[in-house]
Amino acid sequence: MTDTDVAVVGGGPAGLSAALFTSKNGLDTMTFDTDETWMHKAHLFNYLGIESQDGSAFMEDAREQVEEFGVERHQGTQVTDVEADENGFTVSTDEGDHEASYVILATGAKRDLAEELGCEFTDEDVVDVDVEMETSIDDAYATGAMVRAEEWQAVIAAGDGAAAALNILTKEKGEHFHDFDVPDNAE
């Protein structure tokens, strides 16, 4: 059994964005990714800061970036169950169980893990979250297409992941946390 601060289920823009922020700011973070992201069907023309990039190439760049920040990636690993108890979460995979203080669900429109965990859903049959992306289960977050009926855009998903991560970091630090890098030579 492996312990971590944050377990991210899903390795698309939402999941990797969340993992980047939490790991970069000192939380042990692992991701579980089956590589079934819609990004392999995409070409980015409308993602801020990217003029044109193939979705698969974008994913490779994103994976390299999170690894550089110390995220433990479990590529090709299917999460079969997520359970909550008084100590946090147990994330089950074919390779074993992993304990985590926080869980971020970023599985696109696949909402079965959220349903099995007991998360509340809206009338539109999406996972109900607050503005920080937290579900009705304390310390469980849902992002991207899981929480949106139709607004499925990579840039929105990445923002959802960042919002979840910043809320986790705020809880951990005990005060509002902002991830804002300023170069030493900034005026």
Image (spheres, rainbow, N blue to C red):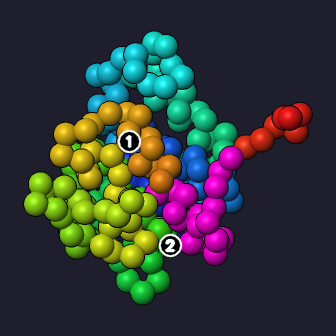
Farthest bottom residue in view: 86
Residue at the spot of label 1: 157
| Residue at point 43%, 60% (across, down) | 132
Viewer can see residue 12? no
Left or right placement of residue 143 versus residue 67 in this view: left
Left or right placement of residue 140 versus residue 26 in this view: left
**Residue 143 place in picture, x, y as percent:** 35, 52
Q: Is residue 99 above or below residue 49?
A: below
Q: Amino acid at mark 2?
A: Ser
Secondary structure, mark 1, is: helix
Tell me which label, 2 or 1, sits earlier in the chain: 2
Q: Is residue 175 above or below residue 178?
A: below
| Residue at point 24%, 69% (across, down) | 119
Q: Which image quadrant for residue 173?
A: bottom right
Q: Is residue 84 above or below residue 152?
A: below
Residue at the spot of label 2: 101
Magenta stretch contains residue 58:
no
| Residue at point 18%, 64% (across, down) | 121
Q: Residues within 10 Å of mark 2 (few under 14, many from 20)?
A: some
Q: Which image quadrant for residue 92?
A: bottom left
Q: Which residues are magenta?
A: 164-180
Farthest front residue in view: 187
| Residue at point 22%, 73% (across, down) | 118
Secondary structure, mark 2, is: strand
